[in-house]
Image (cartoon, rainbow, N blue to C red):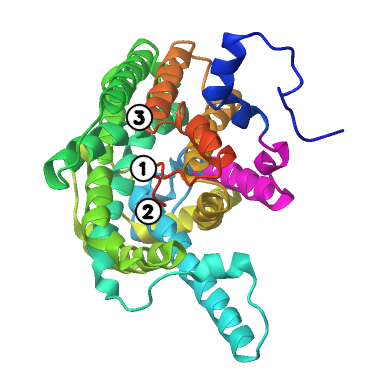
């Protein structure tokens, strides 16, 4: 069967047929189907990103819903069975996963260097993985890591109070704050299409918040406290402001260095892991009191007790699996996300990220949370808003037209430096 479709043999319809040909539609229809086909490797990368991205949220929630006992040596109350509530330590695990990306980059870089020195050809995939500037000051990633540290920890605290599905959906608020901050600090112009997308995102956020307000009993921490659930939602949305600051900082001060994305993620992981690990020490001595019980489940209200966390992990294998899953999934998610952007497009990566929300929602309903129908229109509005804002409804068509006419199309897609 021919992989070309042509309208040249169709019966003439006079002026209409001539107008169709003049419009260039014939060039689009005759475009080769094989140009749009995915390879097995591309399918693998897309599936890996979707699965590991979903596991990242689900494993964190799994740990939050698990219980374990601590060491009574530090106090009698530590011997009681308690939920695993250690958002700061979980953030350390997230940065450990990002740090591993730097190890992967170094291994790939050495492999490419040895092949080049021995006269062997370096594969295209390996070249894409390490392609980037090596002359930069790594300290430029420290502010971004601090933003990531605060934003992620705040989101993990919020996740303890609300559903995993709401957590994943509310992260879409980052579009709103990134757009506003880009106008202020980057002097960017927001088009009418983008404003329309932002409007849909805001409506989606309102619907998701309304769903939690009407049905607060889905939270793993409480079955009745509506205020706690809404507080968790608000913390997640507030975290997106910090994430937006991180994105704007990266675009203004980091992107021009043209660092390989995998290497950039690794450096952020190093700074985040080192900084937050040191902060765990004073956190042990900071007591938040009963008023801060929504942050920690420590019986003596310590802001974070990493030692107790490890004892709880030792008493329940499920917590260990969940924590390891968090570290491993974030590493593979960053790798596959960067690879998807380079092998396919940033648009494809955005679509897969939206599909991740569906996976998290379905698994959450099956495992932890009762079905909440109000969340469905909220997700649709968020997904539609994201698609409109990023031009997912128009860019593929414009790219196809340009490709079939033998022209290059600059759709403004920039590979995210950090995930």
x and y percent of residue 261 in the render? 43, 62
Disc number for residue 302: none
Which residue is label 3 attached to? Answer: 389
Please report the residue visible at 48 percent of the width from the left and 69 percent of the height from the top.
131
* Label whose residue precedes the other's in the sequence (2 or 3): 2
User: In this rendering, would 307 be left or right of 240?
Assistant: right
The outermost residue toward the right is 1
Disc number for residue 156: 1
Specify whether residue 309 is in view: yes
Q: Is residue 20 magenta?
A: no
| Marks 1/2: CA–CA distance | 8 Å
Give the secondary structure at mark 1. helix
Work out whether 225 lies above or below 45: above
Work out whether 253 lies above or below 15: below
Give the secondary structure at mark 2. helix
Q: Dividing the picture into quarters, in which one does residue 8 lie?
A: top right
x and y percent of residue 82 in the render? 43, 42
Could you say which is closer to the camera, residue 41 or residue 279?
Answer: 41
Magenta segment boundaries in residue numbering: 31-56
Give the secondary structure at mark 3. helix
Which residue is label 2 attached to? Answer: 91
State yes or no: discs 1 and 2 in contact (Cβ < 8 Å): yes
Specify whether residue 161 is in view: no
């Amino acid at each position: 069967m021919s992989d070309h479709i042509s309208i040249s043999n169709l019966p003439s319809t006079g002026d209409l047929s001539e107008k169709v040909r003049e419009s260039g539609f014939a060039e689009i229809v005759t475009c080769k189907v094989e140009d749009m086909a995915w390879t097995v490797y591309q399918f693998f990368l897309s599936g890996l990103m979707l699965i590991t991205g979903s596991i990242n949220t689900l494993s964190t929630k799994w740990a939050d819903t698990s219980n374990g006992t601590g060491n009574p040596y530090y106090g009698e109350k530590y011997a009681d069975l308690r939920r695993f509530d250690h958002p700061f330590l979980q953030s350390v695990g997230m940065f450990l996963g990002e740090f591993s990306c730097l190890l992967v980059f170094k291994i790939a870089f050495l492999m490419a260097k040895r092949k080049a020195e021995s006269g062997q050809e370096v594969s295209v995939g390996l070249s894409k993985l390490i392609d980037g500037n090596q002359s930069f000051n790594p300290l430029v990633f420290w502010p971004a890591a601090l933003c990531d540290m605060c934003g992620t920890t705040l989101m993990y605290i919020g996740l303890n109070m609300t559903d995993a599905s709401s957590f994943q959906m509310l992260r879409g608020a980052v579009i709103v704050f990134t757009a506003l901050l880009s106008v202020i600090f980057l002097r960017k112009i927001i088009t009418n299409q983008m404003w329309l997308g932002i409007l849909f995102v805001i409506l989606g956020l309102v619907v998701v918040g309304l769903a939690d307000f009407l049905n607060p009993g889905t939270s793993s921490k409480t079955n009745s406290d509506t205020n706690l659930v809404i507080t968790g939602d608000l913390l997640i949305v507030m975290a997106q402001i910090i994430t937006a600051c991180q994105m704007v900082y990266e675009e203004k001060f980091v992107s021009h260095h043209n660092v390989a994305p995998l290497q950039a993620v690794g450096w952020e992981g190093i700074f985040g892991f080192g900084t937050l690990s040191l902060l765990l020490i004073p956190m042990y001595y900071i007591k938040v009191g009963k008023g801060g019980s929504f942050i920690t489940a420590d019986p003596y209200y310590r802001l974070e007790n990493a030692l107790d966390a490890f004892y709880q992990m030792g008493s329940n294998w499920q917590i260990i699996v969940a924590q390891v899953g968090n570290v491993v999934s974030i590493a593979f998610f960053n790798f596959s996300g960067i690879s998807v952007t380079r092998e396919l497009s940033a648009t494809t990566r955005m679509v897969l990220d939206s599909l991740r929300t569906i996976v998290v929602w379905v698994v959450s309903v099956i495992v932890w949370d009762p079905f909440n129908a109000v969340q469905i229109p909220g997700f649709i509005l968020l997904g539609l808003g994201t698609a409109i804002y990023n031009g997912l409804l128009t860019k593929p068509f414009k790219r196809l037209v340009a490709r079939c006419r033998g022209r290059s199309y600059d759709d403004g897609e920039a590979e995210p430096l950090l995930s």
